[in-house]
Amino acid sequence: MIDYQAVIDRILAEVRNLDCRGRVADYIPALAEVDPNHSAIAVDMLDGRSFRAGDADVPFSIQSISKVFTLAMVFPEIGEELWKSVGREPSGNPFNSLVQLENEHGIPRNPFINAGALVVTDRLISMYPRPKEAMLDFVRSLAGNDDIYFDSRVATSEREHADRNMSLAYFMKSFGNIHNDVERLIDVYCHQCSIAMSCADVARSFRLFANRGVNPADGRRVLTESQSKRLGAVMSTCGFYDESGDFAYRVGLPGKSGVGGGIAAYIPGKLSVAVWSPGLNSYGNSLAGIEMLERFTTDIRRSIF
Ligand code: GLU
């Protein structure tokens, strides 16, 4: 029987000793000021056990991890039709790139690059009169934590530095692929990026995917088993920006990262895991976070491969 607590304690201690700090995201001051020395691991088993190491209860900015939550809200509503507006192939380009959109007629490559996430959030706005509240309610229900909040400082700062996301949105609107007002869309998108959650919250919320679409917190089916499988497939091919192949090679799990330094991943039918270390590599993924997850799947000898 695996002693998960011993495994994550050891990994955290080992990785803290390595010189793999990376660079904290600095495109907005609210992220640049985050202490790079934070690190955490949280594991939630579907049998109800949970294991925590390091700063697992300290909230951080989930950033692009939120793209999975919005997709999980929109996909069941729109179904397969969604893939007419956003693709499901790796992009081979940075997360905020504009270049492919022109050739591909305003259809983003996948829902986890910014352009694709903007399309998904646009559809969310069409679904809910109060999309920000709906989003917060959704993640709170998954994590079982009503204290999860929008970090208003991060949201404001995101909004002040949103020129590129605005460009992506207007460009896609010119192809008819954004249906709502772009200012409103960017406001909702900046808020989703600013959601603050701890590693414990993120691991708990990713049990939804480990549990094949049923939220273990309340037994409610959110995604069909097939939708959960498909969402996991997109995470494993596109969840790590332009480093998705290397993440699959090293870690072997579906998951999603964010430039706040968090990574969430899971083993279907078994467990969810979240790690946090704010220093990023050149692809925008947590440097120590990937290292921790690689050691985790190696130690427990489980991955999806
Ligand atoms: N707020 C960031 C942006 O849209 C999110 C980046 C990320 O985590 O990938 O530029």
Image: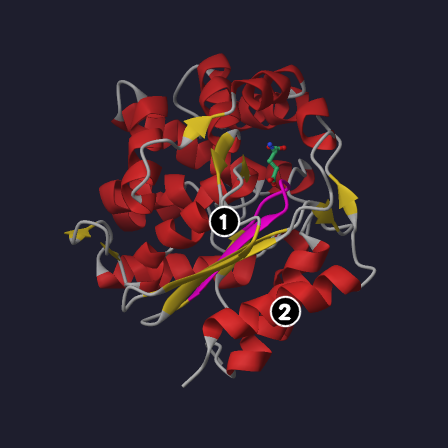
Residue 71 colored in magenta in the image = no
Q: Does residue 106 appear in the picture of this structure?
A: no
Left or right, 284 with respect to 192, comes to: right
Question: In which quadrant of the rendered view does residue 293 lie?
Answer: bottom right
Q: Name the residue under label 2.
A: 11
Q: Is residue 162 above or below residue 200?
A: above
Separation of marks 1 and 2 at Cα, in angstroms: 15 Å
Q: Name the residue under label 1.
A: 199
Please identify the dominant SS of the magenta region.
Answer: strand
Residue 215, position as x, y percentages in the image:
24, 53
Q: Which amino acid does label 1 sit on?
A: Cys
Left or right, 83 with respect to 211, comes to: right
State the residue at coordinates (76%, 52%).
281
Q: What element carries label 2?
A: helix
Q: In which quarter of the image is the N terminus?
A: bottom left
Q: What element carries label 1?
A: helix
